[in-house]
C-alpha cells in the first residue's frame, strides 16, 4: 500500500464501504490500521506457536468454521509480514510451521 501514488481527484469504489474521493486519506487510515494490527499480532506470540494458535488468540472462540478459516488466512498474512520484517522467525516442526519472536 505504501507504493500507491494518487494523481488528482479520483472516485474510489471501496469493496468494503462507501464511495469516497480522498484516496490518500483512506490509504493512510488503512496503513495505520495494519500497523496497529501487526503490533497486536506480535504481542500475541508467546513462545513457539503455530498460525492456528496465534489465530485463536486474535479471534476468540465462538466463530463458525468459515470465520475460523478466514481468520487463519488473515493471521497468515500478518505472520508472513512479521517474518519478512525480521520481527519473528518461522521454522518447521514436523508438518507445522511454527513462529517465535526474535
Image (cartoon, helix red, strand yellow):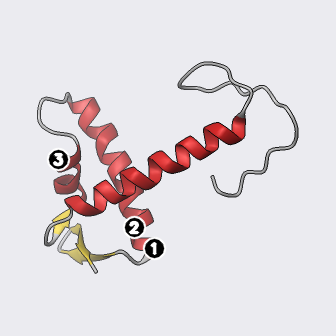
Rendered residue at 36%/55% (across/down):
76
Residue 80 in the image: x percent, y percent?
Answer: 41, 64
* Crowd around label 1: few <14 · some 14–19 · many ≥20 (10 Å): few
Which image quarter is the C terminus in? Answer: bottom left
Say whether residue 28 is left or right of residue 43: right
Secondary-structure class at tag 2: helix
Residue 11 at what x, y percent from top left?
78, 25
10 Å crowding of disc 3: few (<14), some (14-19), many (20+): some
User: Dot 2: within a 10 Å radius of its alpha carbon, few (fewer than 14), some, or many (20 or more) residues?
Assistant: many
Reading the image, the residue beneath label 2 is: 82
- Residue at 24 percent of width and 61 percent of height: 43
Identify the disc placed on residue 56. 3
Give the left or right position of residue 46, taking residue 18 as reference: left
Name the secondary structure under disc 3: helix
The residue closer to the viewer here, 40 or 47, is 40
Quarter of image, res 7: top right
Query: Which image quadrant is residue 23 in?
Result: top right
Q: Nearer the viewer, mark 3 or mark 1?
A: 1
Residue 12 or residue 48, whichever sits in front: 12
Dot placed on the residue nearer the N-terminal end, 2 or 3: 3
Q: In the rendered structure, find residue 85 and report the number of the disc placed on it.
A: 1
Q: Residue furthest top?
A: 18
Q: Are dots 3 and 1 in contact, CB under 8 Å?
A: no
- Mark 2 vs mark 1, CA separation in Å: 5 Å
Q: Are marks 2 and 1 in contact (CB under 8 Å)?
A: yes
Q: Residue at x 80, y 45 (%)?
A: 6
Residue at image position (74%, 27%) is 21
At mark 1, the secondary structure is helix
Q: CA distance from mark 2 to mark 3?
A: 18 Å
- Answer left or right for 19 relative to 78: right
Q: Quadrant of residue 87?
A: bottom left
The total of numbered circles placed on residues is 3
Amino acid at each position: 500500500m505504501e507504493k500507491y501514488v494518487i494523481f488528482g481527484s479520483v472516485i474510489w469504489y471501496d469493496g468494503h464501504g462507501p464511495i469516497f474521493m480522498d484516496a490518500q486519506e483512506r490509504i493512510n487510515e488503512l496503513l495505520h490500521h495494519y500497523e496497529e494490527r501487526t503490533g497486536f499480532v506480535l504481542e500475541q506470540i508467546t513462545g513457539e506457536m503455530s498460525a492456528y494458535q496465534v489465530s485463536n488468540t486474535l479471534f476468540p472462540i465462538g466463530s463458525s468454521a468459515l470465520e475460523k478459516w478466514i481468520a487463519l488466512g488473515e493471521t497468515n498474512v500478518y505472520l508472513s509480514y512479521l517474518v519478512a520484517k525480521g520481527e519473528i522467525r518461522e521454522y518447521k516442526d514436523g508438518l507445522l510451521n511454527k513462529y517465535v519472536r526474535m
